[in-house]
Amino acid sequence: MCGMGKHFRVIEGGRSRRKDGRDEARRVRPVGDTRYWPAQPSHPVGKPVRGRQSRDSNLWSVAPLALALAAATFWGVWTLTAPENGMGSGAIALASSSDRESASFSFCHTGGGYNCVVDGDTIHYRGTKIRIADIDTPETHPPRCEAEATKGAAATQRMLALVNAGPFSLQTIDRDEDRYGRKLRVVTRGGESLGGVLVDEGLARWYGGGRQSWC
């Protein structure tokens, strides 16, 4: 064993003996000692940890899709129910199987028309002039003041949008005609009064007999 150097050690029972005869305690790392051996990560770098962190990552990946679906649903409902002229909050009822009247309406010109809207409470339908019996709206032929003209124009546009929105019904009342020869009818869709939509939006009043000023 000569020639192997003076630092040659002989291991005996947990202790090392130097060649020169002096013993030296064998160095053993204490449990939990990290001064010279840094702790290793509990999981490989770059790989997801199973458990809560993985579940949180999945939730964040699904959240944008859920928000998009919610926004699309809201937009669809708002589009179906929102007033087309941007005024008020009255919703248009869906047509039922009993709603069988329909036409493509336009605005009436001087002298009337076939399928057209005169103002908020008067329409021409298939050659018949109809006074919408349950409401009173501002006059437009002619208006009595600027305020009535503005609100009357809005009521006319709103009624045009309502009668063009789908099938409707014409319900009779206790009188068939008024003194001007107009048919008295309540216009409904799905059992709901279209005139009531204008009332809810501040563009009409429920008719209680006679006329009240809008000025």
Image (cartoon, rainbow, N blue to C red):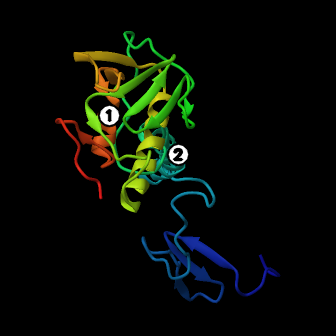
Q: Secondary structure at mark 1?
A: helix
Q: Secondary structure at mark 2?
A: helix
Q: Rounded to the nearest whole Å, what is the CA distance between mark 1 and mark 2?
A: 36 Å
Q: Quadrant of residue 104?
A: top right
* Residue 86 appears in view: yes
* Residue 78 appears in view: no
Residue 207: x and y in percent read: 22, 36
**Is the residue marked by circle 2 packed among few (<14), some (14-19), or many (20+) residues within 10 Å?**
few
Residue 87: x and y in percent read: 40, 51
For mark 2, what is the residue?
68
Total numbered labels placed on residues in the image = 2
Taking 132 as reference, is 28 above or below it? Answer: below
> Left of 173 or right of it: where is 57?
right
Q: Which mark is drawn over residue 174?
A: none
For mark 1, what is the residue?
195
Specify the amino acid type for callout 2: Ala
Give 190 or 40, whichever is nearer the viewer.
Answer: 190
- Dividing the image into 4 quarters, which one contains the N terminus? bottom right
Taking 71 as reference, is 130 above or below it? Answer: above
